[in-house]
Amino acid sequence: MKVDGSSDLLGESGKLIEGLPEDYRYSPPAKVAIGEEREREREREGDEELFVPPLNFSMVDNGIFRSGFPDSANFTFLQSLSLRSILYLCPEPYPEANSDFLKDNGVQLFQFGIEMCKEPFVNIPEETIREALKVLLDVRNHPILIHCKRGKHRTGCLVGCLRKLQRWCLTSIFDEYQRFAAAKARVSDQRFMELFDTSSLKNLPSSFPCSSRQVNVHAQ
């Protein structure tokens, strides 16, 4: 007997199989088993932790990462980085949930508050960038995550100044900055990086070996 033109809609007894999801309530036993297994797989997937990176997340160098502002959905991913430090470039207080995460995971917070400035009223504080670089260059703080709000301008300027110390050419520095800033790229930021004086920092290391902490970056 067929129902809706299909011979697969009845059990071996020729009766409807009751008490099953609609997708396979008319299927023979073998197909019922397959359906149940798929349901169990979906339940297992639901129980697994998701590794969600923050906005604009990327690796900068061994032990150095960058991103936009992480939220609670990103905490499991951040745990996988075994961070020692976070370098925060906004003036606003760190949110309580984020502070609790740092405390629970033994992560130190370094805050260098740089106001969000837009052209033509731009005042990127060079001394603040210099002090932030000293923290960034200290391998005792690695693995470290740099972030601002979107991971574009303030983070981009700091990373660009690091690249000057690493003797990158300006074209490569600007290409990297523009890759994150995209349509929001600012000429003033690029001018700042171009004119930034690295002479007082040249005695500090600017290349970094792999951290003694194992870093496991999930691409999911």
Image (cartoon, helix red, strand yellow):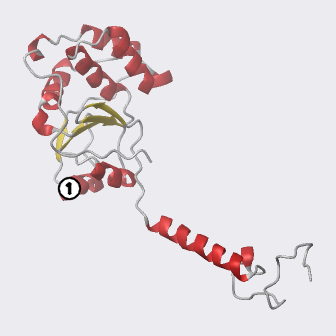
Which residue is at the front of the view, 159 or 190?
A: 159
Q: Quadrant of residue 3?
A: bottom right
Residue 90 visible to the viewer: no
- Rendered image quadrant of residue 17: bottom right
Q: Is residue 3 left or right of residue 41?
A: right
Element assignment for label 1: loop
- Residue displayed at 33% across by 9% down: 170
- Residue furthest to the left: 203
Tell me where residue 14 appears, x and y as whole percent: 84, 89
**Residue 206: x %, y % from top left:** 16, 22
Find residue 129 and report its image quarter: top left
Q: Amino acid at mark 1?
A: Asn
Vertical placement of 64 versus 10: above or below? above
Residue hosting label 1: 105
Q: Is residue 159 visible?
A: yes
Residue at 22%, 46% (x, y): give it. 214
Q: Position of residue 63 (x, y in %)?
A: 22, 36
Residue at 34%, 15% (x, y): give it. 173
* Residue 85 coordinates in the image, percent (x, y): 18, 42
Which image quarter holds the N terminus?
Answer: bottom right
From this view, report whether residue 100 is shown above or below residue 159.
below
**Observer-nearest of 18 and 200:** 18
How many discs appear?
Answer: 1
Q: Residues within 10 Å of mark 1 (few under 14, many from 20)?
A: some
